[in-house]
Image: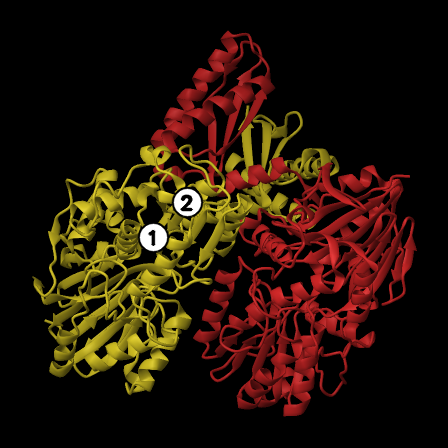
Chain colours: A yellow, B red
Amino acid sequence: MSSQLEVIPLGGLGEFGMNCAALRAGEDLILVDAGMMFPGRRTAASLGVDLMVPDISFLLENRRQLRAIVLTHGHEDHAGGVSYIIDQLQVPVYANRLTLGLVSSRLRERGLDQEADLRLLEADRPVDLGAFQVEPLRVTHSFPESYCFAIRTPVGRIIWSGDFKFDQTPIDGHRSNLARLAELGQEGVLALFSDSTNGDVPGLSPSESSVYEPLEKLFRQADGKIVLTTFASSMHRIQIVLDLARKVGRKVVPMGRSMVSNIRLASRLGYLRTDSDLLRSREDLARIPSERLIVLASGSQGEPMSALSRLSVDEVRQTRIEAGDLVLLSSRIIPGNEKGIGQMINHFNRRGARVLDSRHQPIHASGHGYREDLKLMINLTRPRFFVPIHGEYRQLAAHARLARRQGIPSDQVHLLETGEVLGLSPDKAEILGQVPAGRRFIDEGIRRPVGQELLRDRRFMATDGVLVVGLRIDRMNWELMGEPELISRGFVQPEDSQELMQETRARIRRLVSEAGANGKRDEGLLGQMLQTGLKRFLRKRTRKRPLIVPVVLTL
Amino acid sequence: MSSQLEVIPLGGLGEFGMNCAALRAGEDLILVDAGMMFPGRRTAASLGVDLMVPDISFLLENRRQLRAIVLTHGHEDHAGGVSYIIDQLQVPVYANRLTLGLVSSRLRERGLDQEADLRLLEADRPVDLGAFQVEPLRVTHSFPESYCFAIRTPVGRIIWSGDFKFDQTPIDGHRSNLARLAELGQEGVLALFSDSTNGDVPGLSPSESSVYEPLEKLFRQADGKIVLTTFASSMHRIQIVLDLARKVGRKVVPMGRSMVSNIRLASRLGYLRTDSDLLRSREDLARIPSERLIVLASGSQGEPMSALSRLSVDEVRQTRIEAGDLVLLSSRIIPGNEKGIGQMINHFNRRGARVLDSRHQPIHASGHGYREDLKLMINLTRPRFFVPIHGEYRQLAAHARLARRQGIPSDQVHLLETGEVLGLSPDKAEILGQVPAGRRFIDEGIRRPVGQELLRDRRFMATDGVLVVGLRIDRMNWELMGEPELISRGFVQPEDSQELMQETRARIRRLVSEAGANGKRDEGLLGQMLQTGLKRFLRKRTRKRPLIVPVVLTL
């Protein structure tokens, strides 16, 4: 048996925002988290990709070694990929109760709920998974009952932080397990892998409770409807809204598919304190006066089909935004969504609503630790080796600098790239190599991962269009019959380009007769010659590179 | 002659970020500004559009009335559209010296410099343009010698603010003409049209001089190369960099096409104080030690082909980023570019450089007034009517609220939409109607505006691809000869979809025989039937809507 531990991030770094990491000791492999990510708004830029999950070819190659998937918590970027990979992997999935609920409803949507072996993971109750023992410790985060994993391995203990901050006044009363973290630090931690999302933000991450008072003040000032948005998985924030609604005498109507189903699930599992008088359905909207209403809408990122976007353009049948309404974005703006969110805010303004977000009022608190939280984690666990995970490169780099300043020697701090294999032994950490890793692009329409070639074609057509060339070739003498037919879609406008089309036809005639003369009397070959020849010609004439699709019919 | 003034914003509002407005009194029309805008990074999302200019169909309809285009200053969003519309309008263009220089170099690029009638507009020297007298007043802004226009019209004086802030310590010493603004306020101002870019930002806009000290401190601390980026038209900022470089003993190498040409033009026209020892060319790079070098690069928005982006990925031949280098983003992040800029920063981090932007250090100052500047403008000019211009709807709305709080009655504050005609008479302002307005999309590749249909095709192909259907039809009996040929590009992957293709072929055979049976023996008609029938079929089977391109060859 190898005396080495291999740690391989298959996601969670840089652009690969879906968290996923393989840990291998000898013949035993476990996967920590299996997230997904969205490509942003469903515009041309998405190239028809609905979501991205990690490339799991490394796991498929080593499927017999894989013992389990363990999930730190239920956010999409940590657990959302399970339903896209589980049918190929067939291993137990361990997670807390709410996460299992979310995963199983996703599996049901995909018709996979029968196949999955879901197992409950409880705080402070270690599970043995081959050579590994995974001990879940509570940490505070924007998802209830999130875990940090202390993992016993043949070469020593490692700590996988999961998403965390050190919130001393969490909404659900469950504090981070500081005592156990400190104890582990005393016993000796070989390596800490720690969340870097806010690795470049100074100070201490504000408590979730800190949004309570600002929200209460705004709730009390409002005289019209209140529309509040947050992530549908932010149960603590939703609890605050419910508690405050009761306090100020308003009813809460969840709106948007994920918001409604998450609240239902969390209430059923006991993660939300609410009641049927407080929480109302969309059908009750007409009966609740504006000054008694809070609409809790999903769509904080301005997603075009979301409840919030549809409210902003008056496309929700049961209610409408009016002058004097208050819209609160109690959420983070994910980079890349600024423009879409800005447009949504413009629409609310057009309808006379006031819109406030966390730039105006402290009505959002990050679920991720700032630099002071990160320092505390390092000082509690006192690891020999340090590896920043979960963040863009600049955040990982900032976190690495911070760790060095906390006293971890430079050569014991490792900045990994996706797919790199870090080999850990009690006294050494080194990059051993690289396994295939990256993103699989899922197009729900065609129900499968789409390849690079397909995406490249879409990208070209998005900016340069397509030119279809229809030809009839006389098989006997390899001569063109009639005129080549040219159909431009998204390339040029026919009415503007008659001259160009004339020249293109002449060029085609020349290419066909060249092909005939060279004895290359093959449809496939002619197609290739047309593609190459026309591409070059059109590029010169128009500076554009449309896809060229020859349809050669021989007779 | 009408006793009414019509003011029509043809751009500058909301998503139509290119400033442009028509003013008409009787039979005299003038155009204030003619901007352009970029669609963002040249990715699939741009749909091949290189830039956007205002729709000028209203001007073309009334071309005989148009007396002149007057430009407040030379930023692209105010002057960049001139070279795309001037050949159709053929009127004199008035602007300050640097703006004329920029416009004429753009005209030269497009081969239009012979046609244009460019005329110098000097501060405090009014010009008569039909029924209008335009008096240019200096205001401070990030472009040298920017103007606010006091315009005498048959119904009274209006003030068109242009882009401005009230900078009491401008870099070039030219302060805003507060005295004349106050005097006009005393004489009576019918309406103020005022820049709303920072209409929702509290406080007073910091002086351009405020970046001097923070930059000096950073310059003195740096021991490696300094790479600084700012907008290539920000002459004041460039002057600060040149002055500081001299002070700390570094040479400045401009990099990027617009940066090099703008600096050359501005130096020649006397807008920059520099010399040939201080300012060096790219060829000198190898001879300047890192600690004596400042690279002044364009590409502050992370544009993929820009000097700064190419430096970040080590694609500049003459130099490379090394550990210890300092990268300063002395610029604003335009909403929508956060992600691209973030990726560029990641790349600089990978190379070991430190990257600072205005979130870390006060190294950028906006050229646009904050709310206190805006209040001062209102209080100086004391207008009867107020119209916020230049901004997104939420900024216009915030500016309108501010004006009301400054004492302008609500019914004298007008929030216009693009193309709306505001009728102004000495005691009345009202919306008279709407003229055609919007954006023209320019695809430089095909060298003309592209229509909505072309863009719609590109958008569909970007996400759903194209399916080309090749058919041979026997003209005699209207029967299909051989198998239909199906070519998918960007729709599905052939290897994954053999079943789907089988079904599609069967569907095509049915559609062809239906067409034959119905006596609809026409290629165009058959093509339409195929498009409709297959679109519905594929939508059901795949939830996707590829463009369907039938190539029907009859024999």
Q: Which amino acid does label 1 sit on?
A: Phe
The dot on residue B222 is none
Q: Where is the N terminus of chain A found, in terms of image quarters?
A: bottom left
Q: Position of residue A487 (x, y in %)?
A: 61, 32
Where B490 sits versus A421, above or below? Answer: above
Residue under mark 2: which chain is it in?
Answer: A
Q: In this view, does A248 lie to the left or right of B274?
A: left
Look at 68% across and 68% down and name the residue there: B165
Residue drawn at 32 percent across, 34 percent down:
A284
Q: Mark 1 sits on what residue? A: A231
Is residue A532 found left or right of B174 in the rendered image? Answer: left
**Residue B402 placed where, x, y %?**
61, 58
Residue A225, which numbered label?
2
Q: Dot 1: within a 10 Å radius of its alpha carbon, few (fewer than 14), some, or many (20 or more) residues?
A: many
Secondary structure under tag 1 reads loop
The numbered mark, 1 or 2, whose residue comes first in the sequence reads 2
Q: Which of B412 and B207 is in front in this view?
A: B412
Q: Position of residue A278 (x, y in %)?
A: 26, 44
Q: Are marks 1 and 2 on the same chain?
A: yes
